[in-house]
Image: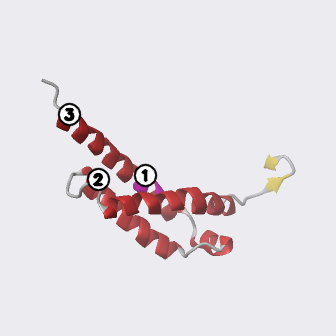
Amino acid sequence: MFQIHGVLDLIFWVLAIGVFALSAWALVHALRTPARAFAVTGKQSKNLWLIILGLATLFGFAAAVQYLNVLSIFTIASVIASSIYLADVRPAVREIGKGGNQGPYGPW
């Protein structure tokens, strides 16, 4: 007999792994970005983003190992914080770090 709860559990577990991957990706990017880039672009400080994304990754991991429910407020806040970083902050700070020797046709 087809068990709907098993399928739903699998779907929510995959979503929890997605939350963890999203927040981990944002945290790794924030760790690799120089603190100067955050200040130049007028975004929040690097330390604040590291705290926010660190907590988001922690809650995403807790959901992935089924310690927290995927629909808990902490997991949803993790998705929101990571999405804001990746959609707003990452494109702004990514341009600052490129630098280097730029000629009229690109780096040389």
Main secondary structure of the magenta stretch: helix
**Mark 1 closeness class: few <14, some 14–19, many ≥20 residues within 10 Å:** many
Identity, as a three-letter code, of the amino acid under mark 2: Val
Residue 6 visible in the current orientation:
yes
Q: Which sits earlier in the primary sequence, circle 2 or circle 3? A: 3
Label 1 sits on what residue type? Leu
Which SS class for mark 1?
helix
Q: Which residue is mark 1?
A: 22
- Percent x, y of residue 52: 42, 69
Q: What's the CA distance linking mark 3 and mark 1?
A: 27 Å
The residue at 42%/65% (across/down) is 53
Q: Taking 99 as reference, is 2 above or below it?
A: above
- Image spot of residue 104 (x, y percent): 87, 50
Q: Is residue 30 magenta?
A: no
Residue 14: image quadrant is: top left
Residue at left offset 67%, top offset 70%: 41
Q: Earlier in the sequence, mark 1 or mark 2?
A: 1
Of residues 68 and 3, the one nearer the viewer is: 3
**Which residue is labeled 3 in the image?**
4
Q: Are marks 3 and 1 in contact (CB under 8 Å)?
A: no
Q: Position of residue 94 (x, y in %)?
A: 63, 58
When the figure is inspected, residue 16 is found, relative to residue 58, above or below; the finding is above
Q: CA distance from mark 2 to mark 3?
A: 17 Å
**Percent of width and height locating residue 8:** 24, 39
Give me the residue at 31% from left, 49% from top: 16
In the image, which residues are magenta?
22-27
- Disc 2 target residue: 70
> Which one is in front, 27 or 22?
22
Whichever of labels 3 and 1 marks the residue nearer the N terminus, that label is 3
Mark 2–mark 3 CB contact (< 8 Å): no
Examine the structure image and report whether residue 23 is included in the region drawn in magenta. Answer: yes
